[in-house]
Image (cartoon, grey):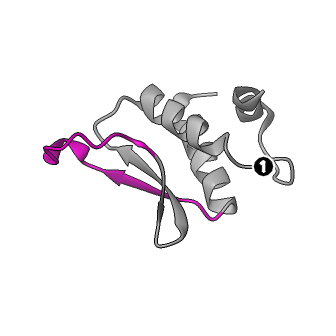
Amino acid sequence: MKESDVLQNLEEIAGQLDVKVCNVNLRKFSYGIKSGLCKVRGEHRVIVDKNLHLSEKIDVLIEALQKFDLDALTVCPAVKRFFS
């Protein structure tokens, strides 16, 4: 499975969990914001620096989504192995 397909699957999983994925240029902020999971006005979001390499974006999403219960979701086996 290509990295772009893995990323798309992870974004779909986030959508099923009502977690918004925001791709943002974090380099424009001088105070060192990093990619990751946060809560904005009571809603979970994953902020992803759009300047990251594709594999780094995948790592950010995996780390964030591991905090949620994925058992009730249908997850592609190729992606599910990242959560084992």
- Front position in the image: 47 or 5: 47
**Quick check: 38 above or below 4?**
below
Q: Residue at x 71, y 34 (%)?
A: 79
Q: Residue at x 73, y 31 (%)?
A: 83
Residue 14 in percent (x, y) is at 62, 54
Quadrant that contains the N terminus: top right
Q: Residue at x 33, y 33 (%)?
A: 52
Q: Position of 75 compared to 24: left or right?
A: right
Residue 45 in percent (x, y) is at 49, 58
Q: What SS does tag 1 mark?
A: loop
Residue furthest right in the image: 72
**Quick check: 68 above or below 59?**
below
Give, as a single range, the part of the protein colored magenta: 18-36
Q: Residue at x 85, y 47 (%)?
A: 71
**Quick check: 28 above or below 40?**
above
Q: Position of 62 compared to 73: left or right?
A: left
Q: Is residue 83 magenta?
A: no
Q: Is residue 19 magenta?
A: yes
The local crowd at label 1, few if under 14, some if 14 to 19, many if 20 or more residues have their Cα within 10 Å, is few
Q: Position of 25 compared to 79: left or right?
A: left
Quadrant that contains the C terminus: top right
Residue 80 in percent (x, y) is at 76, 34
Question: Mark 1 is on which residue type?
Answer: Asp
- Front position in the image: 53 or 83: 83
Residue 18 in percent (x, y) is at 63, 65
**Quick check: 33 above or below 59?**
below
> How many numbered marks does the figure carry?
1
Quarter assignment of residue 15: bottom right
The residue identified by callout 1 is 69
